[in-house]
Image (cartoon, grey):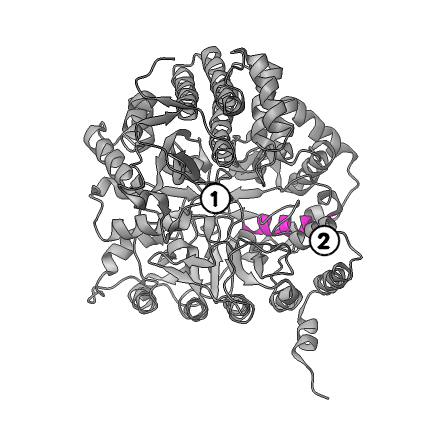
Amino acid sequence: MAVNWKETLISQMPPDWSAEIDTFEAQMKLRKAGKIEDKVFAETRLRRGAYGQRYDNGQRYDGKETQKLDFPSGELTKGPETMWDAPGMMRIKIPYGGLNPEQIRAIADCADEYSDGIGHVTTRQDIQLHYVHIEDAPDLMRRLAAVGITTREACGNAVRNITACPLSGVCRTETFDVTPYSKAMMRFLLGHPDTMDFGRKFKIAFSGCKHEACGLVSMHDLGGIAATRMVDGKEQRGFEIYVGGGLGAVPYQAKLLEEFISEEELLPWTQAVARLFGRMGEKKNRNRARIKFVVAKVGIEEFRKLVIEERKVLPHDPRWTEYLKDLHQTDEHPGQPAGALEGAPLPEGFSAWQTTNVYHQRQPGYVVATVTLPLGDLSTPQLRAVADLAHRYAGDHVRLTVEQNLVFRWVSEAELPALYTELKSLGLGQAGAGTIVDVVACPGTDTCKLGIASSRGLAGELRSQILDDKLQLHDAVKSLRIKISGCFNSCGQHHVADIGFYGNSRNVNGYTVPHFQVILGGKWVENAGSYGLAMGSVPSKRIPELIEKLTGRWVAERAGDETFQAWCLRLGKKALKAVIDEFTHVPPHDQDASYYTDWGDPREFTIGDMGTGECAGELVSLAQFGFTAAESSAFEAQLAHEARDFAKADRLAYQAMIEAAKTLVHVQWRDVPNMPESIATEFKTRFQDTGVFADRFAKDQFANYFFSRHTGGPVRLTDEDTHRLIEEANLFIDAAHKCYAKVSAQAQPVLLTVGAKG
């Protein structure tokens, strides 16, 4: 009797993974029969890696043009109500980004059969397949499980993919290879009972070095940096452990939990932290449900005490140290003997590619070659070709990076010209890895329901203009990094870029105009050493000009080898804001309609059911004056923060939120008493209690920022707390802009004639 492909796969899958997929398939049937509630199944499918996705555009931006996506039922112009109505997204969990050729081919097969033929590399070393129907999910999961890949807990309120430096094991400056530790932690925590009661997601990263970017430990819920110490004359391995970091709407820098945790204690300490998070983390208000809020609330000293106490009562688990018996199980071996690059003629373009895309391993004669992936995308023919090249040149060793690229490891230096020639023939030979042209962007409005402005569209346009020399950039600018998010959630990691952007919008004369908030001063090295601050919102179409102006001024004014971040700090926020302000003007719609569309999409921009209308050129709404006042106060708060006058920064940030709230109240009641208590009361009654202010996805998150400061009084007058309050004020103002755009279609705004009194 012939054996079908499912029966063949069963023999190749880990038994526990196979059983889990069977259970998920059964739950799908119960959901269709109405025997499982929607909210229960939603978390179930999320924990299996299945997301809903956006369909209001039905398009994908490939960096050059917008491609129309066709579906059997015709064009979709509105998002589906449930996962059953239209395909969604499947996120594939790739611990530490490590892949082999067999796994890559399996992903390509799944992308061809169940998706749109594209694999998207994410900023967490995952791969996402879009337009996957939920009913195909179990078979897709089985095919991946047969090659050792899971989608479990790639999404949902769980431990997400554990990331690690893609150079681990071959890095010239690492303390030791963190690969086996990241793999062991993934296996230990996958489906662990102590990680099943989280209120939100939990992200972990490992770094082998402290001074490089590596795993970006500082922006994670939990992170470990490789460290050693001498004990009785012997070197002992361990980790410097950090906890409570995170980007999102308001970024938090991780705090040092312990200077040294031995390798034997790594897993039990992590388990103790997980148990505390499950017990102490917020469950009702999802906007405050990350561990960073727990650490901020109790303080790192108290949290450390709680972890130590929790560790004492943990029942022993042999898996804590079992993996240490064979740390070499993740060791890699080259497929080719080492060789030097001889003096033979080199292919055209090779030298530029070698300069930016090749890293010399600590093992003599071998290099890591980075494949630059514009927008993080690989077609299925490219995926299969990458699998072949990995076998031929890299000893089967491929890793994905958090900058949405992939690397071949253990490439003999002598084979580099041949590898480059083959990559170039596949359209994968672009230079510029880790430079300004290597723009990172989240999916944004292409497929994400939270996307406000087109991050991929802007990234593709910037890359195109830089490559075509449309932007006049100095050679020194090549070292800078640009990162873009489609909304405030920082999936594009905009807070740690030299120049970061996140999508928002502004209402201009009755039209909604795509904008990006500009973030300056972020630090990529030292494991995301510091975060930038929002400097102002600029129309999307003016971002390329802004980059040219900012970088040109840096080159002209920097002192010696002064970094962009150091120059920003020296110049000061007031001078930087003046540069931003040059690019904020939006011409009337009848003068230049291009401002009212987003990159890669010729249609008039919208972020929802918002009314449009035109105001006469000589009339300005009071709302515009009010929001300008609010933004001015927020900027002044930044200046005060820079001058380390934290009391003033706190007062001005609070004043900014009061101004924004008052501006909204004025839409319905012009004569509200100009007192904080009255404004807060009216704002709550008219906008929060009615649900008008709440964002469909963020809910009351931004309103809560305002009321937290209003009722709680001044924040602690520290650098970090006032920094955070300023971020919250900016987000509240952005949300107020968005709310005003929504209500302006139903309520005629009060207009003030320019030049009139009163």
The mark nearer the N terminus, 1 or 2, is 2
Mark 1–mark 2 Cα distance, whole angstroms, equals 28 Å
> In the drawing, does residue 10 fall left or right of residue 746?
right
- Residue 520 visible in the displayed image: no
Asked if disc 1 and disc 2 are in contact, CB closer than 8 Å, the reply is: no
- Residue 57 visible in the displayed image: yes
403, 454: nearer the viewer: 454
> In the drawing, does residue 56 fall left or right of residue 497?
right
Circle 1: is it few (<14), some (14-19), or many (20+) Cα within 10 Å?
some
- Residue at the outermost bottom position: 1
> Where are the magenta residues, as a range?
179-192
Relative vertical location of residue 254 with respect to residue 351 in this rendering, above or below: above
**What x and y, as percent, mark residue 691?**
62, 33
Q: Residue at x 59, y 20 (%)?
A: 682
**What x and y, as percent, mark residue 539?**
34, 38
Tell me the quarter of the image containing the C terminus: top left
In the image, what residue type sits under mark 1? Answer: Ile
**What x and y, as percent, mark residue 379?**
43, 66
Q: Please, what secondary structure does the residue beneath circle 2 have?
A: helix
40, 186: nearer the viewer: 40
**Residue at mark 1:** 607
> In the drawing, does residue 598 fall left or right of residue 197?
left
Q: Residue at x 19, y 67 (%)?
A: 345
